[in-house]
Structures are given as C-alpha cells and as structure tokens.
Image: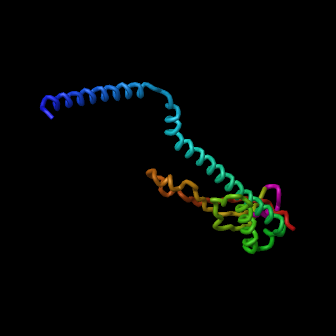
Amino acid sequence: MTLASSATSCSSIGEGMMTGLAHIIRRAGRFTRDTRGAALVEFAISLPLMLLIFAVTIEGGRLFWAYQTTASGVRDAARYLARIAPEDACATPGDFSGYTARMEQIVRETSSGNSLFPSSITVTAVAPELLCQTVSYSASPIAVAQVTATLEVTFPFGGIFGLMDGLQDLDTITTTLRDQSRVFGS
C-alpha cells in the first residue's frame, strides 16, 4: 500500500466517523425533545414512595385496630369484675388480687382475637383493683372495679424509624390501658 492510498483511506475513515458522530448528535437531540414515555419514568420514580405510604397506612390501621381491640378487652374485664365481685366489697376488707388470672385471660383472649395476621400488641401485665369512692349522695363508699393492663406496642416499620436521628428508640413503646366499672355484685 502506498502512502497516498493510506492517507485517502484515513481521511475517508475520519469523514465516516464525523458523519456517524453527527448522526448520533442529531439522534440525541431528538431523544431529549421526545416526551413519549415521560409519564412512565415519573411513575417509576414515584412508585416506591407510593408503596411505602400505602404500607404504612395499612399497618397503621392494623395497629389502631389491635389497640382498640385490646381496649375493648380491658373494658370487658372491668365489666366482668364488676358483676362477679361482692357488692359490699368496700364494707369488708378485701382486694381483687384473686381475680387476676381471669382478668388477664379475658384481656389476652380479646387482644389476640381471631385475626388473620398476628397483633403487634403484647399484653405484659393485668391488674384488677378495688376502689372505694365516696360520693355526696351516698353514706357508704361505692365499690368500683378497675382493671389496668400494661401493653407493649411494636411498630411494624420500627426499622425505618432507626434511620432517622432521634427516633432510634421508637420500635416499641410501653403504655397502660385502664377501665373502671361500678360494682353491682353477684
């Protein structure tokens, strides 16, 4: 191959690259102006956030439902205790500690329920109490049954809270539910 023929072939290669490069630039310009598929890209970017909001809403609803169910169990236990306790509980010295096992059973059964998914609330303690309250319209004190339940609430997305400053200890909280009912006796 001669020097002249190799120079000619190099220049034709250079021209071919320039036309190819110009073609790519024109294609990229059209690509950046084309808006077809932009909605799909925006949807793909926002989908994870929408799924997270949806999951938090569902789990928050389940948590609220479990809390309300447990509160109902504490209320049922207080009403049951008010019915089985003696009417003159304040006149005779006594306490309701003998009813602890039954009250705990009522609260735990109501709390666990027949749900398809396990509850995120754990009943850690239940304590029945006798309160003798004096009121202006009665000469003798009135017996009131009080049931107190201590709960441990586990948040379903507690791991996400750990990613934020100041919220690391928010995966579980301990709270107390309390309900009272006047003793009518058995």
Q: Nearer the viewer, residue 121 or 57?
A: 57
- Residues drawn in magenta: 136-145
Quadrant of the rendering where the N terminus is positioned: top left
Q: Please check the rendered image and state whether residue 151 is part of the magenta-colored stretch, yes or no.
A: no
Q: Nearer the viewer, residue 71 or 47?
A: 47
The spot of residue 179 in percent (x, y) is 72, 59
Q: Nearer the viewer, residue 23 or 151?
A: 23
* Colour scheme employed for the rendering of this structure: rainbow
Instruction: Indicate left or right for 98 with 28 as reference.
Output: right
Q: Nearer the viewer, residue 45 or 181?
A: 45
Instruction: Indicate left or right for 176 with 42 as reference.
Output: right
The spot of residue 10 in percent (x, y) is 20, 31
Farthest right residue in view: 186
Farthest left residue in view: 3
Q: Residue at x 12, y 31 (%)?
A: 3
Q: Residue at x 85, y 66 (%)?
A: 185
Q: How many marks?
A: 0
Quadrant of the rendering where the C terminus is positioned: bottom right
Q: Residue at x 50, y 31 (%)?
A: 37
The spot of residue 173 in percent (x, y) is 57, 59
The spot of residue 90 in percent (x, y) is 78, 68
Residue 135, above or below 125: above
Q: Please check the rendered image and state whether residue 140 is part of the magenta-colored stretch, yes or no.
A: yes
Q: Main secondary structure of the magenta part?
A: loop
Which image quadrant for residue 135?
bottom right
Residue 86, above or below 13: below
Q: Residue at x 77, y 74 (%)?
A: 93
Which image quadrant for residue 126?
bottom right
Instruction: Indicate left or right for 20 with 162 as reference.
Output: left
Farthest front residue in view: 1
